[in-house]
Amino acid sequence: MDKKSIIGIVLIAAIVILWGVWSTPSKEQMAAQNRRLDSIAQIEKQKVEQKAAVQKKEIAAATNDTIAQDSTFKNNDSTSNASLKSEFGVFACAKQAENKFIIVESDFLKVKFSNKGGKIASVELKNYKDYLGKPLVLFDGDTNRFGLIFTSDSKLISTNDLYFNAVSFDGKPITTDALKIEKDSSTISFRLYPENGQATGKYIEYTYTIKNNSFMVGYDVKIINLGNEVVTNSNSIDFEWELTLHQKEKYLKNERIVSTVYFKHSVDKEVDYLSETKADEKNIPTQLDWISFKQQFFTTIFVSNEKFTNASLKVTPDTNTGVVKLMQAELGLPYSKGQVEPISSQFYFGPSKYKTLKQFDQDFEKQIPLGWGILSWFNKILVIPVFNFLEGFNMNYGIIILLLTIFIKVLLFPIAYKTYVSSAKMKVLKPEIDEINAKFPKSEDAMKKQQTTMALYKKAGVNPMAGCIPMLLQIPILFALFRFFPASFELRQQGFLWADDLSSYDSIYSWTTQIPILSSVYGNHISLFTILMTISSLIYTRMNMDTMGSSNQMPGMKTMMYIMPLMFLGIFNSNSSGLSYYYFLANMITFGQQIVIKKYFVDEKKLHLQIQENKKKNFSKKSKFQAKLEEMAKKRGYNPNK
């Protein structure tokens, strides 16, 4: 192994190690997360203390010790009411109430509403399971903070902390804890009243519409006769949304590195996103059509018909067990004083499936990481349609990947053929190349050796770059599929052979002990599909070397050709098993193609005779590659015509 090869290996190893260090959360991020958890713990402690106080009052009443106890609680209630009044003003009456829930089920969703904040407390996707086989709940409880923020009597009010009244479409109170979809849809409203609001017709109303056979939930906001109670500094009212994402997939580390906040600009219609690998935040003064809190295979999208303004978006990594990331958004909703017309918007709660998201015609599907430029178009125009077509036959997804691989390899067969022919020509010329190497063994004769070699290629009518060009044409396809398989929702929880989930890694052996470097680079498991892919890649490399004929011209490159499959062993071990399975199949089919080409299409003896005939001809025209080499030689002071 030469000096350049050693330097290359060291650089690659350094990049892998630096990547692991860079992706680790900083001390500041960890400290911020701990402060958030301490705040949550303090709130929970206060809730427990309040509940204990209520229980104490009930026990005292039951034992007839009412005189002393009642006087104590009256003083406490009086003090509490005064405190609430000073903090929440006319909305103090909505600060204390019993937390109640109402569940509405459709064919796709099970949505639980809470009167606290008048918000969606949890969403269950009825046709999906998480990695443990439990019902897939996108979020639940206090992991979702949600509501309007405004000023009232110089006091900052957040509706997330206040209790609403659940009402039906005609304004009557809802007393049941479960609603059924009426015909095709069902509507439920929550009203937040200030003091005397019910008598004077003043309230804030959230109206939700749930439809059958839809992942969309309508969300309309009305602010009725509250021009003096709801004050803002502009023609918009602030809306806060904070969501803690929890693990849904088998491999938490991979789920973390693909989850982030996406958003679409209203003016140029471009879809952008925050960093997937580190803490990130962005203030956007222009209008947005929608924002999305996206996980690996599921997403929650907030869409406004009136556009969002002055958005502040933030994503924070989280290293707690089972937690993916913390997503935050502060948005401006259009509002004018005393507005009666609803602020209309919608939520999408569902899978990040290309076909499902694309049907909304709002660029939701651009959240799926299919690659950029030609990579994305190749997946959209060719791979996804073929994949969806094969799905229609209800075959196992392992068989679908096999058929997709065969289709792609047949499509690329002309390129494979040209590559093989070029390699075979180089193999035929190998003895003469060896003679040239022996004739110019000294390093100072390197330029003469190169010129003599190029003269041989010219006489033989062989272009040494002919084999590289077809390979370069295949690279975009390889990278496109590298993006497609890990992002393909269709492979989620689909088993094949020993793999229980083709969207995640397969494992034939695993361990829990953390081994320095090995655990961070390779992982704590062994993927059999990745091993098969690596072995087949090494065999493929050896076959290419044999076909082209071994050469001493670039020994370092030969070494690197063998090292790269070993590098992929670490990269692919924790990646989609469907991806490793595809590359293994692609290698095996390539072996078969080479055997067929060698046996039925390319006769090396005839090829040798053809090259000898070419050498007798006068190839006066130089290839661009040959001309470039001669130009470089002249710049170094060597004249090939002497």
Image: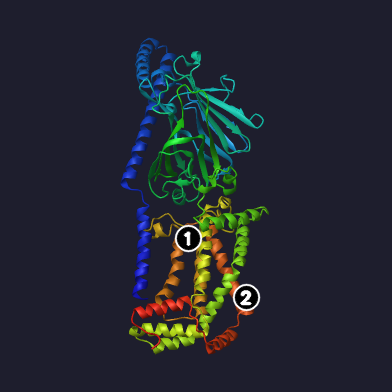
Q: Nearer the viewer, residue 377 or 189?
A: 377
> Could you tell me which quadrant the N terminus lies in?
bottom left
- Counting residues from the start of the chain, the first of labels 1 and 2 encountered is 1
Query: Percent from the top left, x then y, of residue 129?
Result: 56, 44
Query: Extreme top residue here?
Result: 67
> Could you tell me which quadrant the C terminus lies in?
bottom left
Give the amino acid type for the residue marked by disc 2 in the picture.
Val
Mark 1–mark 2 distance (CA, rounded to whole Å): 30 Å
In the structure shown, which secondary structural element does the residue marked by tag 1 occupy?
helix
Q: Callout 2: 10 Å neighbours few (<14), some, many (20+)?
A: few
Position above or below: 250 against 340: below
In the structure shown, which secondary structural element does the residue marked by tag 2 occupy?
helix
Q: Is residue 535 visible?
A: no
Q: Nearer the viewer, residue 219 or 543?
A: 219
Query: Percent from the top left, x then y, of residue 610?
Result: 58, 86
Q: Which mark is residue 504?
A: none
Q: Residue at 51% of width from left, 40% of height from top?
A: 300
Q: Which mark is residue 596?
A: 2
Give the amino acid type for the residue marked by disc 1 in the picture.
Phe
Disc 1: which residue: 572
Residues tagged 1 and 2 counted as in contact (Cβ below 8 A): no
